[in-house]
Image (tube, rainbow, N blue to C red):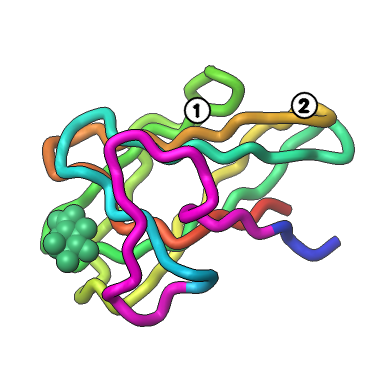
């Protein structure tokens, strides 16, 4: 089946703001994480059946430094400091991919910054 897309601007945001000032995003904007450790975006993801899913995170990082994030699923850490490297400009979008275990039905995927720079700008996740 086609991936299901979840826009960051529609997710639950802690210490971040929705913006649209850097072109190339999908939907109506992206999330600019606050430049602090622990800022996060949390997605409510529904799965038809239990099993591993491929999550593609679309982001931009206009700095020269990595903006790593922890990826948790239903409260369990599944990717420790996943890299979100520099993309060259805030208008240049790239993807990071992680495989995660989902339950049948409702799931919570949280993407939390782990360095003082905060997360990258996050456009959306796609789940397949
Ligand atoms: C700049 C940029 C933002 C970005 C921020 C950051 O202010 O315009 O889109 O989120 O840097 O460093 O996180």
The residue tagged with tag 1: helix, strand or loop?
A: strand
Q: Is residue 93 above or below residue 36?
A: below
71 magenta-colored:
no
The residue tagged with tag 2: helix, strand or loop?
A: loop
Crowd class of label 2 (few under 14; some 14 to 19; many from 20; radius 10 Å): some
Q: Tell me residue 62's x, y (percent).
A: 19, 68
Q: Which residue is mark 1?
A: 72
Q: Which residue is mark 2?
A: 103
Q: Tell me residue 45's x, y (percent).
A: 68, 40
Q: Residue furthest top?
A: 75
Name which residue lies at 24% across and 72% down.
90
6 magenta-colored:
yes
Crowd class of label 1 (few under 14; some 14 to 19; many from 20; radius 10 Å): some
Quarter of the picture holding the N terminus: bottom right
Magenta region, residue range = 5-25
- Looking at the image, is mark 1 or mark 2 earlier in the sequence? 1
Name which residue lies at 61% across and 42% down.
99
Seen in the image, is 35 located left or right of residue 24?
A: left
Name which residue lies at 36% across and 56% down.
18
| Alpha carbon separation for disc pair 1 and 2 | 13 Å
Q: Tell me residue 119's x, y (percent).
A: 27, 46
């Amino acid at each position: 089946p086609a991936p299901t897309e979840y826009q960051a601007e529609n997710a639950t945001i802690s210490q971040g703001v929705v913006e649209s000032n850097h072109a190339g995003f999908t939907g109506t904007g992206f999330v600019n994480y606050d430049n602090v450790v622990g800022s996060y975006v949390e997605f409510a993801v529904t799965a038809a059946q239990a099993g591993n899913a491929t999550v593609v995170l679309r982001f931009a990082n206009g700095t020269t430094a990595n903006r790593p994030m922890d990826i948790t699923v239903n409260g369990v850490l599944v990717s420790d400091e996943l890299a979100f490297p520099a993309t060259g400009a805030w208008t240049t979008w790239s993807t990071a991919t992680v495989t995660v275990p989902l339950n049948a039905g409702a799931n919570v995927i949280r993407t939390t910054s782990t360095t003082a720079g905060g997360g990258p700008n996050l456009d959306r996740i796609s789940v397949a």
